[in-house]
Amino acid sequence: MKTSIQLLLVISLCHCLLIGQPASPKKKTPPKLPDGVEVLENIEYAKPSGISLKLDLYRPKVADLPTPVVIFVHGGGWKNGNKERGRRGAWLIPHGFAVASINYRLTNQGKWPDQINDCYAAVRWVRENAKKYNLDSDHIGCWGTSAGGHLAALMGTRPYPGDEQISSRVQAVMDWYGPSELLTMPPNVVGNGRTVADVAKSNGALLLGSTVRDVPNLAKDASALDNVSKDDAPFLIMHGTADKGVPIIQSQKLHAKLKAHGVESTLIEHEGGGHGGPQFISKESNQTVLDFFSKHLNPKP
């Protein structure tokens, strides 16, 4: 009798635990690819310091002519994120483009300029492998969001400082709410409640290996605003006016400087928009994106 009661108590306890146990989180289903699109996943494009860097290539299943490429650079404060976010750009493929979404070294793997060097390497990989994958090596653009927008803007303004047999220059840049001037980004600056200790833990400090005030020249090297010149690629910049992560002044200053140097630049300010959101993927926004890349990358749908 005693054993039976103990068994019932154990069963009852297990039942209570099961009822109170939260359901396992469901894995998000990736967006469905448009018809006629194939994806070649996990292609290694570089291996700096033994770190395998991979990309996912989205391209038309059938293409009579070489396809221009948009390299997608994900955000995440240079310390998070991955190439899977590039799947959002697959809607461009039926319009005559390919999209190469890349991983790059995060701040736990390398410091500046490792991140931009990885972006240069991705552009070179596209050109070097253009014939193999039926890509147009003469028409390569880039698209980045947040920290990826920061890197994309540098791909269009900061030339590779060394010698390269294959060019890493791009023909068009789309920058979504990326920081353009690290020296003035609020998390990098002491004040308004931020202490020296806070700034030392900022994403900018993690990227540079030190605070911006300790390495101002390195911070300028890592800022598109300080690398603008008259031969830069055309820009399309989008930013929300209510962005609390990256103040819109970062994009406004970059746009103004590009224009002052005679570089084609368009700034779309999404009224009330935050750090991303539905305004960036609206029908109107998509049309602006399509018009921009179509003008500069010469697709053949």
Image: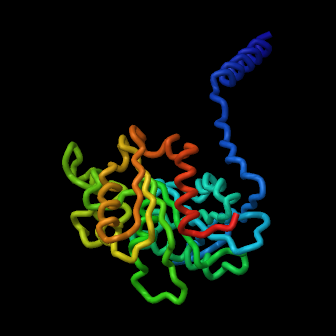
Viewer-closest of 23 and 214: 214
Q: Is residue 205 visible?
A: no
| Side (left or right) of 37 relative to 275 | right
Against 17, residue 112 (above or below) is below
Viewer-closest of 243 and 217: 243
Q: Residue at x 63, y 28 (%)?
A: 22
Tell me residue 127's x, y (percent): 61, 80
Tell me residue 227's x, y (percent): 33, 72
Tell me residue 278's x, y (percent): 52, 40
Against 280, residue 181 (above or below) is below
Against 264, residue 248 (above or below) is above
| Side (left or right) of 27 relative to 184 | right
Please state, as top left, top right, bottom left or bottom right, where the C terminus lies in the image: bottom right
Please state, as top left, top right, bottom left or bottom right, where the N terminus lies in the image: top right
Viewer-closest of 49 and 249: 249
Q: What colour scheme governs how the chains and residues are painted in the rendered image of this protein?
A: rainbow
Where residue 54 sits, quadrant-wise, is bottom right
Q: Residue at x 78, y 58 (%)?
A: 36
Tell me residue 46's x, y (percent): 58, 76
